Structures are given as structure tokens and as C-alpha cells.
């Protein structure tokens, strides 16, 4: 039986609801709805003009409605009179196929028909910076290897502990918080779950971190590469496929050297086969390509991939197998759309299963120093334009995710690229003003 949001509001003291959706660029859009109106909104949805967000619509299109998913309800820990809801987009009574959460739910439904459930966890890195974003907020955080630095971590105790306490209150089971590899950078981990729940929590986590940081006079950014000399913000995903009930991990095989089943290797093969076409989704901004293929940073390593490869418990590869029954995909960055991230993983993996794709032989080398020894490896795109073109021409992604969303996404991303090319940079002036 569906949750009655009006009743929940009375029981929990909720005065307002944020009915939200995420557009194709990953921007969180919302309407603030008083609790007195939530019953109608639960039935009919909150109205939006689709053209006003990053969706492939025109001003002539009719009203778009976000139908809130009651199961996604999160009561804001720092403002408990407000409840946040993820919405699914409809127009003229039909789901909008070219919308991120709907796209993910479609992938989940297709996998469920084959008896599969995807479970994932994400590792969201972010920087705490000054309000204008030009420098990290902690001027004393200057070590060349600041990762796990206790002093720098504890100087941000008030922010980090409030975020972690919020996750505990929400039942996310957070289990560790640390200072990451770059000065001013942090990561906070919570337990993996069904991929839709993980995506909803990922969306809310980014909002929560930014809001709590702002409440402390700071700014949080998930930008892929905000500082060229420092490690960028990754968003690694830990992936496993389970049976329909979610009780059995179908990726685990204790007889295998790496603890992976034949099914897991086929899923992995699908990722390897399709990952170049997924780059514009996993790494969706111009800035993203300053993180992947990056040279060593101040700490000595970029911690981001430079080719399509996988290995054991080896962080220099695009895909790492840390232990039995799961793998870690290290390509994605902080700008990735949480719903399209999960939809892309599932689409590629299911293509791998359907076609029994082999991931090839794993590599047991340091990719930052010995990549030249691995012949024939596919390379990652060098810029957003190349990545978009690979997405556009992928027959596999079109078959799995659908032409409508692929065309809409690529259209808007190409416009984004063209906007970038019309920008004149200081680098250009410095290099060519006197040519």
C-alpha cells in the first residue's frame, strides 16, 4: 500500500515538501509545497515548464509534472519541518523517457524481468572551499600528501560530523569519513543498497553536503577538477548483481581466483565494451577531462584512470576488484548525474550478459608507470566532444537505454560544448596575442 504523505506530514511534523527532479545535466530542481497541498501533489504531481530546465523541450510543450515517490521521502535533519521527495516526470499522462530517474527505473525493470537486482555504493569526493571557489577553505592544509591527515580532518570536525550524524539519523549506515588525497578534499562513505535507493541518496547527499557547508560559512564543490595541481573529485561506484529478492550475490564465486562468477565477468565485459560510449555520462563536463588522463598531482598520483583496463586490488586501473563478489568502477567524477550513472552501469552490464562479453585478461601492472607494456588497450576520450560523439553512435547504448534519451542528452551536451568553444581564455591570450 502506498505511503500517505498527508498522514506522514501530520505524524512527523512536516510543514513543507520539496518535490524534486534531476535534469539531464544533473541539476536538482524542486518546488516547495505546503503540507496542506501534498495529497493533491501526490496524486497529480507538481507542475514545471520542462524548457526551463536542462531537458530537451520547447516553450510550446505542455506542463510537465513531477509525481513524488513516497518511498524516497527524506526529512531534512537540519530542518525537520521540510521533507524531500524524488519525483518521476510525466507529460500528458505519460512518463518522460528522456528524464534521468525514469531512465534508471526502466533499466531496473528490464533487469528485474531477468531476475536481477543491481546493488551499488558510491564514494562521493568533494572539496570545502572559500565562498568564491578560488581556494580551499583551510589555509593550513598544505601537506603534499594530505590523505588521511587527522589534523586537517579534525579542523573540519563540525561540518563532517554534522553530515555524518545526519546520515546516521536517516538510516544510511555511514561507516567512515576521511580527508582525501587533495588538500581540502573529503570523502564520506555509507552502505551500498539497491541502485535506485543509492541514486536517490546520492542526489540528496550532494544537496546536504552543500547546504551544511553553507550553514558553516563554507562552500562544498563536487567539481571534477577545481584545482589543476590537486587530485580531482571522483565518484567511484562499487557494483554487484543480486537475485530478484536481493538475498544472493550473483557476482560471488569463491572458487574463482578473484572471487567473481561467470556472470560477473560478462557484466564486467559489458562495462569494458561500452565504457568509452559512457564517458560523456560518467564524465559529463568540459572540466571532467582535466581529471581523467591527468598527469601526476602534488600528491604524486592523479588516482584517475588513463585507459580502459581492470585489475585486482590495484587503484591504477579503471576497474578494481577489491574483494570477492564486487568490483569498483573508478572512472566517474563528481559531476556525473546520479541516475544516469546507475542507468549506464546497468545498461552496459546487461549488454555484457546478453552477449556474453569477455573483459579480457586482467592486468597486474602499475598503469601510471607501465601502461606502455599493455598493448592494444582502448583509450579514454580526451575531451567532452569526443565523448559525446562516442555516445551518439553507440548502438548498444541506444538498444539498452533508448534513442530518445540518448538523442536528448547528446543534443544538450553538444550545445554545452559549443558554448564552451565560444569562451576566450587567458591561456589563449597569453599564447597568441603576440603571434
Image: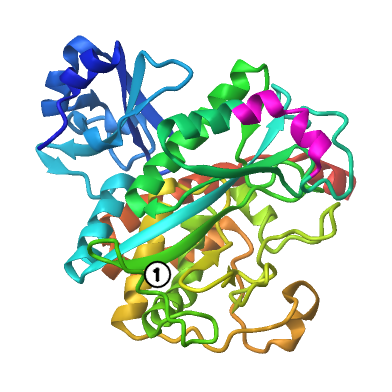
158 in magenta? yes
User: Disc 1 marks which residue?
Assistant: 393
Relative to 167, residue 286 above or below: below
The quadrant in which residue 133 appears is top right
Q: Measuring 59% from the left and 66% from the top, which residue is drawn there?
A: 381
Q: Is residue 242 left or right of residue 95?
A: right
Does the rendering let one see residue 99? no
> The residue tagged with tag 1: helix, strand or loop?
loop
Picture residue at 28% right of the left edge, 39% below the top: 57
Task: Decide: is 287 above or below 308.
Answer: above
Residue range of the region highlighted in magenta in the rendering: 149-161
Residue at left 38%, top 70%? 348
Label 1: how many residues lie within 10 Å, few (<14), some (14-19) or many (20+)?
few
Q: In this view of the protein, which residue sits in the foreground, 62 or 44? A: 44
User: Who is closer to the viewer here, 87 or 16?
Assistant: 16
Residue 403, how many percent across, how many down? Answer: 27, 61
Query: What residue is at 26 percent from the left and 48 percent from the top?
Result: 102
Residue 32, percent across and down?
32, 16
Q: Position of residue 86 (x, y in %)?
A: 31, 34
Q: Classify residue 101 as left or right of residue 54.
A: left
Amino acid at each position: 500500500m502506498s505511503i500517505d504523505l498527508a498522514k506522514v506530514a501530520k505524524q512527523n511534523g512536516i510543514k513543507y515538501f520539496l518535490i524534486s527532479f534531476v535534469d539531464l545535466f544533473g541539476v536538482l530542481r524542486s518546488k516547495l509545497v505546503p503540507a496542506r497541498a501534498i495529497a493533491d501533489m501526490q496524486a497529480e504531481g507538481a507542475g514545471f515548464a520542462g524548457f526551463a530546465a536542462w531537458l530537451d523541450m520547447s516553450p510550446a510543450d505542455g506542463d510537465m509534472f513531477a509525481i513524488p515517490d513516497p518511498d524516497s521521502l527524506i526529512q531534512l535533519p537540519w530542518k525537520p519541518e521540510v521533507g524531500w521527495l524524488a519525483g518521476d516526470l510525466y507529460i500528458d499522462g505519460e512518463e518522460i523517457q528522456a528524464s534521468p530517474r525514469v531512465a534508471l527505473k526502466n533499466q531496473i525493470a528490464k533487469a528485474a524481468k531477468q531476475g536481477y537486482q543491481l546493488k551499488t555504493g558510491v564514494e562521493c569526493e568533494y572539496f570545502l572551499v572559500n565562498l568564491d571557489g578560488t581556494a580551499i577553505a583551510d589555509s593550513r592544509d598544505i601537506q603534499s600528501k594530505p590523505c588521511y591527515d587527522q589534523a586537517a580532518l579534525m579542523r573540519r570536525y563540525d561540518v563532517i560530523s554534522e553530515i555524518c550524524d545526519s546520515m546516521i539519523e536517516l538510516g544510511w549506515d555511514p561507516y567512515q569519513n576521511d580527508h582525501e588525497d587533495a588538500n581540502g578534499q573529503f570523502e564520506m562513505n555509507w552502505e551500498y543498497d539497491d541502485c535506485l535507493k543509492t541514486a536517490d541518496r546520492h542526489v540528496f547527499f550532494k544537496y546536504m553536503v552543500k547546504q551544511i557547508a553553507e550553514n558553516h560559512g563554507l562552500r562544498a564543490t563536487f567539481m571534477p577538477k577545481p584545482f589543476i595541481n590537486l587530485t580531482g573529485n571522483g565518484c567511484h561506484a562499487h557494483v554487484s548483481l543480486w537475485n530478484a529478492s536481493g538475498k544472493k550475490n550473483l557476482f560471488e564465486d569463491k572458487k574463482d581466483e578473484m572471487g567473481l562468477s561467470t556472470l560477473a565477468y560478462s557484466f564486467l565485459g559489458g562495462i569494458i565494451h561500452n565504457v568509452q560510449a559512457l564517458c560523456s555520462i560518467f564524465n559529463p563536463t568540459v572540466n571532467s577531462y582535466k581529471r581523467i588522463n591527468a598527469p601526476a598531482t602534488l600528491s604524486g598520483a592523479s588516482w584517475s584512470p588513463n585507459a580502459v583496463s581492470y585489475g585486482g586490488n590495484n587503484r591504477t586501473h579503471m576497474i578494481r576488484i577489491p574483494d570477492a563478489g564486487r568490483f569498483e568502477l573508478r572512472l566517474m567524477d563528481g559531476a556525473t548525474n546520479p541516475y544516469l550513472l546507475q542507468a549506464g552501469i546497468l545498461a552496459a552490464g546487461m549488454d555484457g550478459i546478453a552477449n556474453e562479453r569477455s573483459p579480457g585478461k586482467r592486468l597486474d601492472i602499475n598503469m601510471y608507470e607501465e601502461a606502455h607494456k599493455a598493448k592494444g588497450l582502448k583509450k579514454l576520450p580526451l575531451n567532452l566532444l569526443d565523448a559525446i560523439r562516442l555516445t551518439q553512435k553507440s548502438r548498444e547504448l541506444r538498444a539498452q537505454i533508448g534513442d530518445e534519451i540518448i538523442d536528448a542528452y547528446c543534443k544538450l551536451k553538444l550545445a554545452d560544448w559549443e558554448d564552451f568553444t565560444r569562451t576566450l581564455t587567458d591561456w589563449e591570450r597569453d599564447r597568441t596575442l603576440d603571434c
